[in-house]
Image (tube, helix red, strand yellow):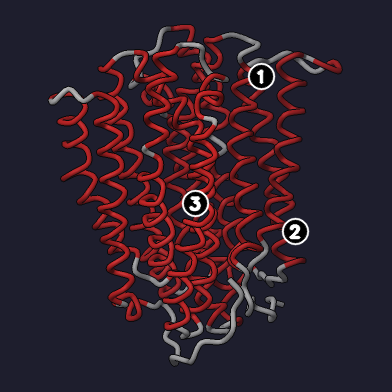
Amino acid sequence: MENKNSVVKLSLFAITWPIFIEMGLQTFLRTADTFMLSRVSDEAVAAVGVSNQIIMFAFFMLNIISLGAAVVITQYLGAKKHQEIGKLVATSILLNLLFGLLISSIIFFFSNQLLNMFGLEDILFGLAKSYLVIAGSMMFVQAVFITVVAIIQSHGYTRETMLVTVFINILNIIGNYLFIYGALGFPQLGVPGVAISTVFSQCVGLLINLYILTHKVRIRLTWKHFYKWQKDHVTKILKIGLPSSATMLSYNASQIITTSFIVSLGAEELTTRIYTQNVMFFIMVLAISLGRGGQIITGHLVGAGEMDHAYKQTIKNLKISWLITIPTVVVINLFSKQILGLFTSNPEIVSLGVSLLLLGFLLEPGRNFNIVVERSLQAAGDARYSMVVSICVIWCFTVPVTYLMGIHWGFGLIGIWITFVADEWIRGLFLYFRWRSRAWENKALVKQKITKPKAITG
């Protein structure tokens, strides 16, 4: 049976800290692959890096279903429509499985054409293809994996998915060690071995998460649920998933373009950007985790018809994110030279990096606006508005002004960073005023009688 004990009292901290650790571990998983491959050759690292650009783009595409499913299910849980949860879960899993199979087939059959876009040398091309064919053709496993994780987390079980991520990280590192170094009699496969290790750990993780879904969360799935879809379920999932994913894809596409601007400034500026982003990534992951935790809470409240409570909770979540983010920025800036010194001994890179980290006092609060409020708008069913704001601001303001500030007017990386600050604040304020307008109250996916707010810990 579906879990009748839907989350009534949700703690932002209790939901968020496992998400934060899980995202950190996912980043560590990619770093571990890179570090261990560096022992093979620089070419191996470069080849996997190129292949992962294609895989990450496919991953963002697969989020269409998982993001939509997460929001719809939280609202249905809040509305206590438990009889619909099993149908929604089955529809979401099968829908993303089919989408994943399509993407896997495209990567498998068109791997040459996809890699030709990068103009790789023959040696790099061969290595990149060996990784892409194995890891990319198994994207359907990743499709089901991220959908199941999103569903489990929507029920408030974030610690369980975190523990699974810990386990598959360990499994992946062991697999890398066995296949890269040929330990314990395993074949020494290099790049293909890393791909096999990655896919195997994901398959094991998927099986464990499916067990959690059916035994811990207690979702009852029947074959009837899988082949008998309800049109309104699919419509609601896509209504949230499509604009949410479009926002992510638009942002990542703009980052590729702005990176090309930075490349034209020279190697030192590009290196400074990479090191600075690595340092600030910790804060960004923190904001994303708070946004995801807040999204789960908001979805439950909106589904329950507690609009006033959802409104106040998001404002509270935003304040909490600032209270955590700003002190973290302070600490990073106090030790900025020492931290950057871990990456490089080049004084010019360190000096420029210190200046960029100082701008974090303006950048990170604006980023919190975007992440926390955007996630809440999505949870309330108002994903289209955030998509329109993001696409319009990024392509009408951010990309052209980045070129003007950084290249045309000659302000370099500092000018580009100032544009990033302006971008975050402009988008964030648009989203904040939308939340304050409460226009999102009419976008709920589950129609429910509006009730007075109940006590929820934050």
Res 409 seen here: yes
Residue contact between numbered discs 1 and 2, judged by CB atoms under 8 Å: no
Mark on residue 46? Answer: none
In this view of the protein, which residue sits in the foreground, 46 or 282?
Answer: 282
Q: CA distance from mark 3 to mark 1?
A: 28 Å
Q: Quadrant of residue 82?
A: bottom right
Where residue 185 sits: x, y (%)? 85, 15
Where residue 443 sits: x, y (%)? 34, 76
Instruction: Identify the secondary structure beneath mark 1.
Output: helix
- The residue at 49%/80% (across/down) is 303
In this view of the protein, which residue sits in the foreground, 190 or 101?
Answer: 190
Which three-letter amino acid code belongs to the residue tagged 3?
Ile
Which three-letter amino acid code belongs to the residue tagged 1?
Met
Instruction: Identify the secondary structure beneath mark 3.
Output: helix
Q: Is residue 338 above or below residue 234?
A: above
- The residue at 36%/44% (across/down) is 363
**Residue identified by numbered label 3:** 288
**Residue identified by numbered label 1:** 36
Mark on residue 211? Answer: 2
Where residue 344 sits: x, y (%)? 51, 15
Q: CA distance from mark 3 to mark 2?
A: 27 Å
Where residue 257 sits: x, y (%)? 27, 31
Query: Callout 3: 10 Å neighbours few (<14), some, many (20+)?
Result: many
